[in-house]
Image (tube, rainbow, N blue to C red):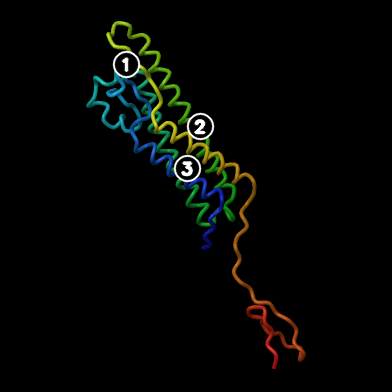
Amino acid sequence: MTLVLTPAAVCQCFTLVSLCTSIADPNWIQVQNCSDSSSGLIYGVAFTLHAYQNLTDTGPLGGLHGWGMWLLYSLAALCYSAVLFSSSSFLLDFLGAAVTRSKLVTSLHILTAFIGVMVVCVCVACMSVIEHNLQRAKSQTERLCMSAGESFYIEVLGLLFSLLACALALKGRPVPIRTCEYLSVDGADGDTEPLIGGAEREE
């Protein structure tokens, strides 16, 4: 088995790190008081795991069964799918499958980039729903503001690495590293002797 650390595999490794970091960080979208930013609500992939325990925090999402909540569930599913395909493409590329199974590895790179685009689009759609719900809530006394959290920007960075890995995978197949070979020359007596280290032995 030949281990080949291609540029596409390196970029995909950074993509995988960015995805895992954005999933672990719960702050994808934050809603806070415009006059007091010390406290507020944060929404993200981690919020979907305990949404039923925080029913009062789902107001900006349109409730527990609102569009914002369903978009968060979609965001979580896409993020975990992106981790699966990103890790698969990285491992197959690193293990040398990019040479023997180039179409499969390239397809995984493309699919990872496509899912990354979907993650960003779903997050933007969820922010639009939250912004719309905040504007509709005219009866509340305090004014709430919505902004993107650090996890969103980490995901955008991971998407850039994924697109770069996709471009490098489409550029061409990696050249495998061959092992050292012996060179041979014809001796004076017609026999063939190997050359080791480029030096010729003379009797």
Q: Looking at the image, is mark 3 or mark 2 earlier in the sequence?
A: 3
Q: Residues within 10 Å of mark 2 (few under 14, many from 20)?
A: some
At horizontal 59% and vertical 47% (from top left) the residue drawn is: 103
Note whether residue 63 is visible.
no
Query: What is the number of the mark on residue 15?
Result: 3
Disc 3 on helix, strand or loop?
A: helix
Tag nearer the camera, 1 or 3: 1
At horizontal 76% and vertical 91% (from top left) the residue drawn is: 189
Find disc 2 in the rendering and name its residue. Answer: 117
* Viewport quadrant of the C terminus: bottom right
Looking at the picture, how far across and down is residue 112, in whole percent?
50, 39
Measure how far apart labels 1 and 2 are at the Cα level: 33 Å
At horizontal 64% and vertical 46% (from top left) the residue drawn is: 171
Note whether residue 164 is visible.
yes
Q: Looking at the image, is mark 1 or mark 2 earlier in the sequence?
A: 1
Disc 2 on helix, strand or loop?
A: helix
Disc 1 on helix, strand or loop?
A: loop
Q: Amino acid at mark 1?
A: Ser
Tag nearer the camera, 1 or 2: 1
Find disc 1 in the rendering and name its residue. Answer: 35
Tag nearer the camera, 3 or 2: 3
Measure how far apart labels 3 and 2 are at the Cα level: 13 Å
Q: Residues within 10 Å of mark 1 (few under 14, many from 20)?
A: few
